Image (cartoon, rainbow, N blue to C red):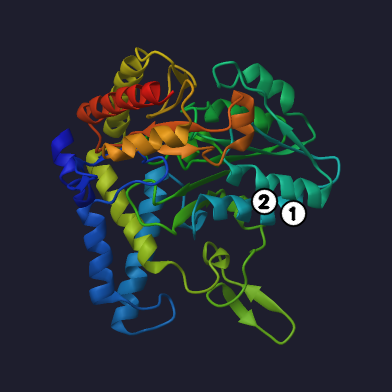
Amino acid sequence: MIANDIRKQFPILDQEVNGKPLVYLDSAATSQKPKSVIETLDHYYKNDNSNVHRGVHTLGTRATDSYEGAREKVRRFINASSMEEIIFVRGTTTGLNTIAGSYGRANVGEGDEIVITPMEHHSNIIPWQQLAKQTGATLKYIPLQEDGTIDLNDVENTITEHTKIVSIMHVSNVLGTINPIKEITEIAHRKGAVMVVDGAQAAPHMPVDVRDFDCDFYVFSAHKMCGPTGIGALYGKKKLLEKMEPVEFGGEMIDFVGLYESTWKDLPWKFEGGTPIIAGAIGMGAAIDFLEQVGRSEIEKIEHELVTYAMDRMSSIEGLKIYGPKNRAGLVTFNIDDVHPHDVATVLDAEGIAVRAGHHCAQPLMKWLDVTATARASFYLYNTKEDVDALIDGLKTTKEYFGHVF
């Protein structure tokens, strides 16, 4: 698909905001949804709505087939070995909490280490903080280079034989840094640790092969990859998942329930207690179909061209500072001298341009950057160079307005 053909698949983009054509540059927060995903959800609720696994009637069979079919699509999407390794969760946050609450509680103790980085999203910091408090383990951080990247020598020095878990984001939602997951995984395994990857900002934008990475866990959310909110996937190596205890208990995940003891279903269902997010999973499968039709290598190319163009144009604006490395994923985080990021976002919104402003759920990274907040423009497959041009015009308007005010 060419850019305009892709854009036409997203109905929400065909509107005006504040009298201006909508320019949506906030896909790192959540992506927009193509017609095919919207229609899939509509079809499910109109024709197939039923609970899964439990019934023998036709609607139940249809719903179950679609739900489990979506699991197979997720498996292929990240090249997992088996559907047993794919667990549907509410999103990346739930997936990381599940790993910390199950694998972490069983395998981390006093004197052990958990290693992360200062660039992590809060959802990849707080579960490990809590685990360290509960177990007496030490939480350690791999230092960042000046441009917000990781040096593998620092990885070697930070991970020790006492490290049990290394958990790192594949792509930074603030800096756009693309971390060398395969190389970090090799170091973690050599030191005897398991490797957890927060793939929320990577899986929607670039090819992901968990078998090539050899990571032990990989988590991501559907809403950032053209799918519905409230659904995501947790990949885990089968040999680890089999030994892990569930963290939610109830219907669906049981094999036998007695008065005092119960047993669990096999993988992956032992981790999916209660009625699952059926429509969400089916919608996630439809989103995968859409992304694979375009091709993630093509998506990666589109975003690389856009972010390169954006950084080139933004660097010519006096008083605008860009954070993060030159080689990055498709987002630009920035500040304008003497203008608060929320004011930048407000002026841009008046021009019909949606960007994100704040700490981006990364307060430790904000402290490392020595700022309280930043503005962020993030790109996806439906964006164009015309969107970037509109952003540049909006930033110039912002500077002019606050130049007159102050």
Tag of residue 105: 1
Q: Secondary structure at mark 2?
A: helix
Q: Nearer the viewer, residue 258 or 105?
A: 105
The relative height of residue 196 versus residue 49 in the rendered view (above or below) is above
- Compared with residue 351, is residue 94 higher up or lower down, i.e. above or below? below
Quadrant of the frame with the C terminus: top left
Position of the N terminus, as image quadrant, is top left
94 vs 364: above or below: below
Tag 2 residue = 100
Judging depth in this view, the residue of 98 and 340 nearest the camera is: 340
Looking at the image, can residue 355 be seen?
no
Question: Within 10 Å of the Cα at label 1, are there few (<14), some (14-19), or many (20+) other Cα atoms?
Answer: some
Residue drawn at point x = 59 percent, y = 24 percent: 369
Q: Amino acid at mark 1?
A: Arg
Image x and y of residue 294, in percent: 23, 39
Give the CA distance from mark 1 to mark 2.
7 Å
Circle 1/circle 2 CB separation < 8 Å: yes
Residue 273: horizontal and vertical position, in percent?
Answer: 55, 70
Q: Residue furthest front?
A: 405
Looking at the rendered structure, the kind of residue marked 2 is Ala
Q: Which residue is depicted at the point 27% across and 70% down?
A: 44
